């Protein structure tokens, strides 16, 4: 039981180190954090319920996950294929596409919540 606890603590430290590195080195991740904070503030302004905050929180976690994986993919490509290549370009583009789609999902969610608050649709 003690070794399992140590493993969890060690994994947590590694995760926090990865998050620190992501935020320190990736402008896109920092922009994501600021945009997410603004989105949470927007939900407050709209007076939305806890459910919408939970959904936005989950979307934020998924966004940061995809952003971290995209950064990892970019680092691997830079290391294994440092020259400019079709492989590197396509691989990095696919990672960027993954980030784009989760951003689209978050945007659609915020638009739907905003439209519901304005009385244009009913969620």
Image (tube, helix red, strand yellow):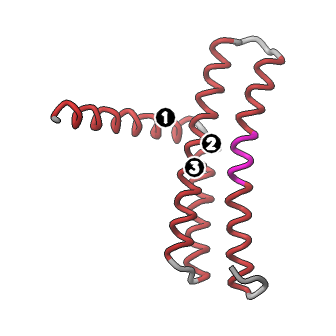
Give the spatial CA distance, label 3 vs label 2: 17 Å
Front-most of 116 and 64?
A: 116
Q: Position of residue 106 (x, y in %)?
A: 67, 59
Q: Which mark is residue 8?
A: none
Above or below 90: residue 28:
below
SS for tag 2?
helix
Residue 13's quadrant in the figure?
A: top left
- The residue wearing badge 1 is 21
Mark nearer the N terminus (3 vs 2): 2
Q: Nearer the viewer, mark 3 or mark 2?
A: 3
| Residue at (61, 23) in percent of width and height | 75
Q: Position of residue 123 (x, y in %)?
A: 68, 79
Label 3–label 1 contact, CB within 8 A: no
Front-most of 28 and 96?
A: 96
- The residue wearing badge 2 is 27
Range drawn in magenta: 97-103
Give the spatial CA distance, label 3 vs label 1: 18 Å
Above or below 82: residue 44:
below
- Binning the other alpha carbons within 10 Å of mark 1 as few (below 14), some (14 to 19) or many (20 upward) gives few
């Amino acid at each position: 039981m003690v070794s399992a606890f140590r493993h969890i603590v060690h994994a947590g430290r590694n995760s926090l180190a990865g998050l620190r590195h992501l935020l320190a080195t990736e402008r896109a991740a920092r922009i994501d954090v600021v945009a997410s904070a603004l989105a949470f503030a927007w939900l407050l302004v709209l007076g939305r319920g806890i459910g919408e905050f939970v959904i936005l929180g989950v979307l934020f976690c998924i966004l940061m996950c995809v952003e971290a994986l995209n950064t990892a993919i970019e680092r691997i490509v830079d290391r294994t294929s440092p020259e400019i290549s079709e492989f590197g370009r396509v691989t990095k583009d696919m990672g960027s596409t993954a980030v784009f789609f989760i951003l689209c999902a978050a945007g659609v969610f915020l638009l739907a919540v905003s439209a519901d608050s304005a009385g244009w649709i009913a969620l």
